[in-house]
């Protein structure tokens, strides 16, 4: 039998959730405002957050992928 890979990679067609709605949902594993304040450029370039007018939109799949890659050094800069 072949083993299937069940992990999915985020795509550009993944849904974007408004930041306020994402925070209220309880699915945010970290304090998002803190994360954006200290890592905005990196989060935007990875597609984890997108600016739409005055609002931030979150791609949950991209955010989780970003956290796996950068989470260890995502705190305040020293």
Image (cartoon, rainbow, N blue to C red):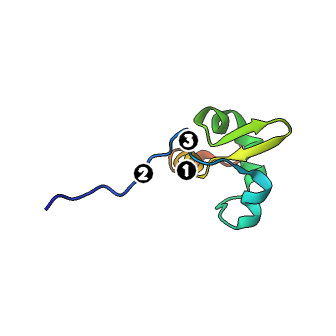
Residue of label 1: 61
| Quarter the N terminus occupies | bottom left
Using the image, determine if residue 75 lies above or below residue 26: above
- Residue 50 visible? The answer is yes
Using the image, determine if residue 22 lies above or below residue 46: below
Q: Quadrant of residue 12?
A: top right
Kindly identify the residue that appears in the image at 64 percent across and 61 percent down.
29
Kindly identify the residue that appears in the image at 78 percent across and 51 percent down.
33
Precedes in sequence: disc 2 or disc 3: 2
Residue of label 2: 8
Q: CA distance from mark 2 to mark 3?
A: 13 Å
Mark 1 near mark 2, Cβ–Cβ under 8 Å? yes
Q: Which mark is residue 32?
A: none
| Quarter the C terminus occupies | top right
Precedes in sequence: disc 1 or disc 2: 2
Q: Secondary structure at mark 2?
A: loop
Q: Residues within 10 Å of mark 3 (few under 14, many from 20)?
A: few
Precedes in sequence: disc 3 or disc 1: 3
Q: Secondary structure at mark 3?
A: loop
Q: Position of residue 34 (x, y in %)?
A: 76, 50
Residue of label 3: 13
């Amino acid at each position: 039998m072949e083993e299937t890979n069940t992990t999915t990679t985020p795509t550009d067609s993944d849904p974007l959730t408004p930041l306020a709605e994402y925070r209220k949902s309880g699915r945010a594993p970290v304090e998002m405002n803190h994360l954006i304040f200290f890592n905005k450029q990196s989060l935007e370039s990875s597609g984890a957050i997108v600016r739409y007018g005055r609002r931030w939109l979150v791609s949950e799949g991209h955010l989780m992928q970003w956290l796996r890659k950068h989470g260890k050094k995502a705190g305040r800069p020293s």
